[in-house]
Image: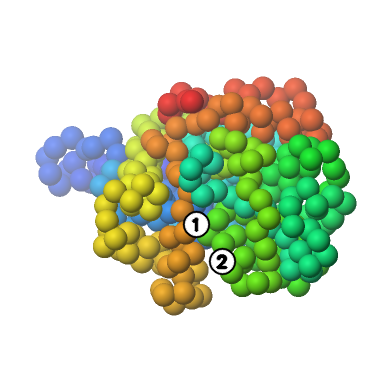
Amino acid sequence: MRMNRRHALATMGGAAAAASGLSAPAIANTPLVVGALRLTSHSASFIALERGYFEQAGLNVELRFFDAAQPMAVAIASGDVDYGITAMTGALISLADRGAVRIIGGALQEEPGVTGQKYLVSDAAYQDGVTTPAALAGRRYAVTQAGSSFHYMGSKMAQAEGMELEFVPLQSVGNIISSLRSGQVDGWSIVPHIALALDGSGAVHIVGDVADYIPDYQVTTVFTSQDNAETEREMTDTFLGAFSQGVADFNATMVDGETGEDARDEMVRLIHQYVYTDRDYEAAAPSIINGSMRLSPNASLNVASLRDQLDWFKTEDLVDGDIAFETVVDTSYVETV
């Protein structure tokens, strides 16, 4: 059983104070588990860990990886993970409704002029004339689970086009990719570093941009337990500060190109330790570079986007229709836009 965080802080901080004769710092070697997916969009956590931003802030961070967003939300609620970066999902909203989790910041976002998420189709569907998102009408569309971000993206596109899709839950990104390659499903949407690589293989084709249907989409968020949000404010502020340093480095180097090619190469090598680890660097680098989307500066939140997502979940009867926005999102930690 994990030591209670306050107990750990008191023990470590007290020992340091006794050794130095000085008062203990408020944050000192605090153990944290941070949930992530092996996607370029989670690079801020990788950067903050590898460049020592977490350590400098007094946080002893362990990354724990998941195959989909919803299991991460469950892990936050159970206390197995302290902070997570993932999409707003039905599971997350339902857990928030039960007083278990809160969204506290933003991460990945769609932005005009920056390559964003793509709609994909299998080669079999493409050869059958499915060359636009609208042509997916009546087709099999892959999602990890009902109520996932993939479900939201597919549904918003279908609503805009006035059509129906058959949503097929496949539980993980890996399963979806295999099924799309083999033609068992017809369509999907995903971040650009995966979409562009799949499109280049010839087995899958890009047919549209998610931003055309969901502009300014707050794709992923930073979230934590209700207890952390309400009673561990200093620790949560500290985590968001260190995470935001990783965000700033990523945006400057990978999105805005402010730091030059050598700095970009260094960062791509850092990210490659976590993303496309089954490929050598030369094969992985183009996908990482070409698929870099904007991360929300200072973990700011696009409230309008999150409200739209929550309304969609309610309309689809995927969550309780009475749940309040404030029950899901704590806007007190970061700037809102």
Q: Tell me where residue 212 appears, x and y as whole percent.
A: 64, 41
In the visual, does 38 lie left or right of 252?
right
Q: Name which residue lies at 79% across and 40% down.
A: 161
Residue 62, image quadrant: bottom left
Q: Which mark is residue 99?
A: none
Amino acid type, mark 2: Ala
Element on which disc 1 rests: loop
Q: Nearer the viewer, residue 279 or 202?
A: 202
Q: Tell which circle, 1 or 2, labels the residue nearer the N-terminal end.
A: 2
Q: Nearer the viewer, residue 243 or 297?
A: 297
- Tell whether label 2 touches label 1 (CB within 8 Å): yes
Residue 205, image quadrant: bottom right
Q: Which residue is mark 2?
A: 197
Q: Which mark is residue 291?
A: 1
- The extreme left residue here reads 21
In three-dimensional space, the C-alpha distance between marks 1 and 2, rounded to whole angstroms, equals 9 Å
- Neighbour tally class for label 1: few under 14, some 14-19, many 20 plus, Cα within 10 Å: many
Q: How many marks?
A: 2
Amino acid type, mark 1: Gly
Kindly tell me whether residue 315 is visible in this rendering.
Answer: yes
Element on which disc 2 rests: helix
Kindly tell me whether residue 58 is visible in this rendering.
Answer: no
Q: Tell me where residue 6 appears, x and y as whole percent.
A: 39, 39
Q: Tell me where residue 111 appears, x and y as whole percent.
A: 50, 39
Q: Tell me where residue 229 appears, x and y as whole percent.
A: 49, 31
Q: Name which residue lies at 60% across and 36% down.
A: 215
Q: Name which residue lies at 27% across and 56% down.
A: 260
Q: Name which residue lies at 57% across and 42% down.
A: 219
Q: Nearer the viewer, residue 336 or 153?
A: 153
238 over 336 or under it: above or below: below
Q: Nearer the viewer, residue 330 or 157?
A: 157
